[in-house]
Amino acid sequence: MKNKNIYNGKDSYEEWASEWRQEDRYNFRTIENKWQNIWDEEKAYKVEIDKTKEKFYALVEFPYPSGAGLHVGHPRSYTALDIISRKKRMQGLNVLYPMGFDAFGLPAENYAIKTGVHPAVSTKANMDNFTRQLKSIGFSFDWDRCFATCDPEYYKWTQWMFIKLFENGLAYKDKIAINWCPSCKVGLANEEVVNGCCERCGAQVVRKDKEQWMVAITKYADRLINDLEGLDFLERVKSQQINWIGRSEGAELDFALTTVDGKEIEGKKLTVFTTRPDTAFGVTYMVMAPEHDYVAELKDVFENKDEIQNYVTETSKKSDLQRTMDDSKTGVELKGIKAKNPYNGELIPVFISDYVLTGYGTGAIMAVPAHDQRDYDFAKIFNLPIIQVLDGGDISEKAYEEDGSHINSGFLDGMNKDEAMKVAIKYAEDNNFGHSKVNFKLRDWVFSRQRYWGEPIPMVYCEKCGWVPLKEEDLPLTLPEVSDFLPNDNGDSPLAKATDWVNTTCPKCGGHARRETDVMPNWAGSSWYFLRYCDPKNDKEFASKESLEYWMNVDWYNGGMEHTTLHLLYSRFWHKFLYDIGYVPTKEPYNKRTSHGMILAENGEKMSKSRGNVINPDDIVENYGADSFRLYEAFIGPFDQVAMWSEDSLNGVYRFVGKVYALMKKVYGDIEPSKSDLRAMHKCILEVSERIDQMKFNTAVSSLMTYVNYLSGLEKVPAELYLTLLKLMSPFTPHLAEEMWARMGKSTLIVKESWPVGDNSLAQDDEVTIAVQICGKMRGTIEMPKDASREDVEEKAMSLDNVKRQLEGKTIKKVIVVPNKIVNIVA
RNA sequence: GCGCCUGUGGCGGAAUCGGUAGACGCUGCAGACUUAAAAUCUGUUGCCCGCAAGGGCGUGCCAGUUCAAGUCUGGCCAGGCGCACCA
């Protein structure tokens, strides 16, 4: 292929070469631009299903197209998988490396409120800017597959999937106390609340009772934990997800509520969840959350009604944050009732206290103060008895939370934990007051947002039929045009004002109905975008079976740790649901998950607009070039750890790029590489290949530098060595590699060339330096042929002057020789 | 409190299985080129003693295992991240 483009518009290589032979500076601006255009025209990274080739699906988290544009943090992840994708491509794999936009979200809407610019308009402009920036860095995305979650052709399927969730009983409307951000005027999922504050704006979250769409992710809790096994995820990702889902095994037990004289109150049993039913003989009181239903239902029985009511009112005023920050124990006894311990028949007092949470377990606990520190603290304040039921430890100062054999526990006495657990649960089952039970910290997913710029929820409410989903042929339900984006304090979405849109007919009975006016959370669109990349233009289904079967799973997914308990968990759940109803071929979406560290400013602070220390990738590309930028992102430090931006270090790799460029002047096609040349080359091939696969990009780059240092030391560089260098560098610095490849007279694109294969035997040194130690202390080194005999090594070591001196007057006890590494003389 | 991670020169960081600690880069210093500066190139750069040969000390701290420990074991200290009254 003699492509005129490659010769910069000139007809022949010679004509073109005469031009650049005079250049002495690497003109990255024109060169990078040129190759980006050529890749674009040639659609060098376009990919189609090809069953004759092994596929590789590399994925990075698609960005939210913010007005601020790309941040230097984004390219860290994109460059990493771009390097991997480019190498895999050169190794002959069919690589899908797509990019798109997670385009719904609050900032666009807040911007609209401030300026009146419609979110669709500002989002479009931002996406154009992002696209320009991403292209300027030379990522090998298949741009033909690009889409945005706010495209109606895309969110049609998000809505379709929501209806599937509804039809399968996994989406339901419920009135619950939600986390309400008074500043964003929007309800938040648990995952979006950080330290009691809104993840996005930092305002303190308050409780608000609201009718919300909920998605029953908790039904998948067990599978979300169990199926992590066997996935190649970072350990900390796995453990964070497991931790968040918070599985605990135990039992649910019923304690009959009675009047003070022990008469059971009809139909009122206090059910508690406990992980330690075996400690039931140590229960000395019960606690309910102040929000527990019984507090209202039994209020006529209480003798201290007012006191109770006061406490309930006080706690409801407190924010969740205040409630968790303050761990001093408060509470009120419910006078007039008692609970009966089903294990020993004893009557014990019942309290309400805010240290018991309404959202976890049954909202009530049995308190075992001897063996739980929180119960212990409470018991001390309220002067309640503390009965030790596990042997060992001293409970005079604090609770004993270790294990021990059971004491004071009737028929459980003498048993260990496992045994006693079994017996206690069996006893509960036999006597019909309890059973074993698994509980999770994970809550169902709050799926409504009282906002405008999101996917409309495709549901209508009909007086007669209740909540009814739209018919598939009526999708997408597009967002209506509105001019007023302000939500109100009641928590109504701006959509509620579009009355023409809201009022509609019921798809089932044809009667009058009202549309849901809340929209979906921004996590909805990102829950399945990786499926759409497989077949992004399909208007019959979200992706064809064929494409899903070929491309799925994602082989390698890189993204931020901050999404571990949000997007990553949601999308795994969403995928499992689609699998269950037969629409995707695999149980899990991602085979491998890695995570990049953050990039901090030069002084170690976070980059932020308010600090004014944000580095704009545009400036870096402009001043140093895309290749230097990419190479620096790779070289900045261990990929999974935080890294500090440093202009000096960036300048270092910039110098290196110039060095590679300048090296070409020493390249000659007519000389044979020496043995040591080949050794340096094969060493570099092996190291770079391995280090890319392990995401050790910083040391991969240092291998390249070492190799270039070697080549720079040569009088004349054999062409083979330089061409190999270009191939090895092309994943990191594709423009430079492409340019020099062409200047070497090659008429192919280097990105389509094959990856070099390293030969281990050629990479071996035939002479090795062996360290000589005396009693473990370094005393010198000797040069020996590789695999020299033990005797030869020993003899040569002994002949060193310094060794002789050190050994004077000492007797040698032992000599340890590690082949090709070390000899240690013990005297 | 629970879970996870990190700790190495002036700085970012290297170091398969325990086997020459400091690769590679930055900075600093000295020199070359230049009228000069920038750029570029060469040398040098862990600390201490020494003219040198060489010696001593050194991977957060304390112990241990070993011929040999940045690496393994036990116990601390410091910093970071996540969860957090989860029964």
Image (spheres, coloured by chain):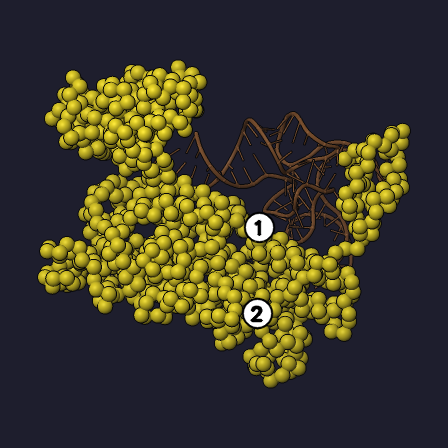
Image position of A825 with respect to A625: above or below: above
In this rendering, position of residue B1 left or right of residue A312? right
Q: Is residue B11 above or below residue B33?
A: above
Establish if B13 lies above or below A260: below
Q: Position of residue B71 (x, y in %)?
A: 63, 38
Q: Give me the residue at 48% from left, 60% from top.
A: A58
The residue identified by callout 1 is A637
Task: Return the residue found at the far bottom.
Answer: A11
What residue is at 37 percent from the left and 23 percent from the top?
A371
Identify residue type, mark 2.
Val
The answer to whether tags 1 and 2 share a subunit is yes
- Closer to us: A790 or A39: A790
Q: Secondary structure at mark 2?
A: helix
Which chain does the numbered disc 1 sit on? A
Q: Is residue A555 visible?
A: yes
Q: Colour of chain A?
A: yellow
